[in-house]
Image (cartoon, rainbow, N blue to C red):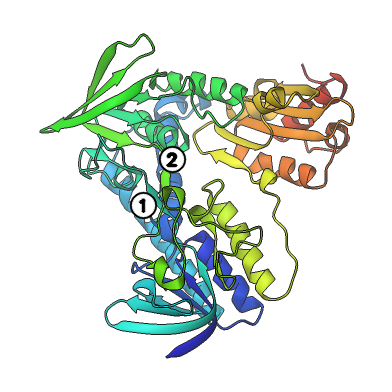
Amino acid sequence: MDKFDVAVIGSGPGGYVAAIRCAQLGLKTAIIEKYSTLGGTCLNVGCIPSKALLDSSEHFHNAHKTFAEHGIEINTPKVNFEQMVARKQSVVDQTCDGVKFLMDKNKISVFEGLGSFENENTIKIAGKEEQKIEAKNIIIATGSKPTELPFAKFDKERIISSTEALKLPEVPKKMVVIGAGIIGLELGSVYARLGAEVTVVEYLDRAIPTFDGAMSKEITKSLKKLGIKFQFSHKVSDVSRKGDTVTVKATNKKDEEVSFEADYCLVAVGRSAYTEGLNLEAAGLKAGERGKIEVNEHLQTAKSHIYAIGDVIKGAMLAHKAEEEGVFVAERLAGQKPHINYDLIPGVVYTWPEVASVGKTEEQLKEDGAQYKVGSFPFRALGRARASGDLEGLVKILSDKETDEILGFHVIGPRAADLVAEGVVAMEYRASAEDIARMSHAHPTFAEAVKEAALAATDNRPLHV
């Protein structure tokens, strides 16, 4: 039986990054993946393929809607959806191959098959042939799966999860999306750009409810321009299929029953921790609420040599959060003292315009009774935004009324996913709004909106509005 210092179960961003960092630190490392490709949900059926389709659909949308304004005259563009999906898959394949290269480069042993505990140090791998390995330390990084509603079981044809939405055989004529969170808005916007009539049905009273209210308001306004219809404060009660038609029944805030028909229904109400098949009990562990594994501040389970990271534990289900946790565990195993500031893990919605946020929302600050200042600046006022035609959105900075320390950093607009990193860096070093305001930002850039919002938060003196 092969023996390792560390065995990682799951090869998503948390797992493979943990394995790489362990190997870099001189630990003999193994990684176990039940599928034939590495990369987990994120690389195979999540972050990477969705971004590929988002970019492709945005190119089509621009060719159809904005090229003429730029002086580019072409025949009316058509969607070759088969090629779009094929390109998406090639991006996925290249990315997964890149992870395999990194495993080989770092001399990490890769085992294909379903990993499960035989005891607290032995893992059984059910692949083409059964194998067993032993490890001093084990990292559980098995990720999550789409949450299924009891009255909307996935048939994977017409009633679908995000997994199936990434490889549909056609562009839907009509699509109902249940859930106005990140996944629902991203995939809904893909198909709206490609010509589908999209209706988003949401239980709460606004989109992306965990984000700042200004971001929610702006993204809703923007996506309505794409033709997406929103039905907020609607409680879905039934989803049924007859032939190629799906009917979604819901109750609105007036307690009236309404129904929506479409040829596809995407259920995007979140994700649940995936621990099936691990045989946790054999290691003296058990899954708690919604399948999640309890860990302490060092990410140790009830067994101190068994760790859990990413979507299987508490906190935001984000690839970069899992990566940070993977590095954290690896460095602790090597005797280092790393840290993670969970308050500074940014959240992103990859629609266009993008939405990105870190820190407190204005609603949270109000609830906390905090004294704060608000500075915001619209992209419309930037020369760079006018040059590219990306006029929607704004940067919003929240700072402490007394100390001016930045408490929240929120962006909706072009390249918001990249711009939010400036806010993360500033907040990691507990910078003030004035610190950002005094930094030189290149002109013309989208980042100038950050400087202007900081000026507005400092003493309400933006230069360009």
Q: Secondary structure at mark 1?
A: helix
Q: Quadrant of residue 17?
A: bottom right
Q: Earlier in the sequence, mark 2 or mark 1?
A: 2
Relative height, residue 306 to residue 451 (above, below)? below
- Badge 1 density bin: few <14, some 14–19, many ≥20, Cα 10 Å: some
User: Quadrant where the C terminus lies?
Assistant: top right
Residue 24 location (% of width, % of height): 64, 77
Which of the two discs, 2 and 1, sits closer to the camera?
A: 2
Relative height, residue 190 to residue 330 (above, below)? above
Residue 370 location (% of width, % of height): 77, 25
Amino acid found under the numbered disc labelled 2: Leu
Q: Nearer the viewer, residue 302 or 425?
A: 302
Residue 87 circle label = 1
Left or right of residue 407: residue 147? left
Q: Secondary structure at mark 2?
A: helix
Q: Residue furthest left?
A: 243
Amino acid found under the numbered disc labelled 1: Arg
Q: Is residue 444 visible?
A: no
Residue 54 circle label = 2
Q: What residue is at 55 percent from the left and 65 percent from the top? A: 302
Q: Nearer the viewer, residue 385 or 12?
A: 12
Left or right of residue 18: residue 263? left
Q: Is residue 351 visible?
A: yes
Q: What residue is at 43 percent from the left and 38 percent from the top? A: 183
Residue 463 location (% of width, % of height): 83, 21
Residue 246 circle label = none
Q: Nearer the viewer, residue 201 or 462?
A: 201
Q: What residue is at 42 percent from the left and 40 percent from the top? A: 270
Q: What residue is at 41 percent from the left and 31 percent from the top? A: 61
User: Quadrant where the N terminus lies?
Assistant: bottom left
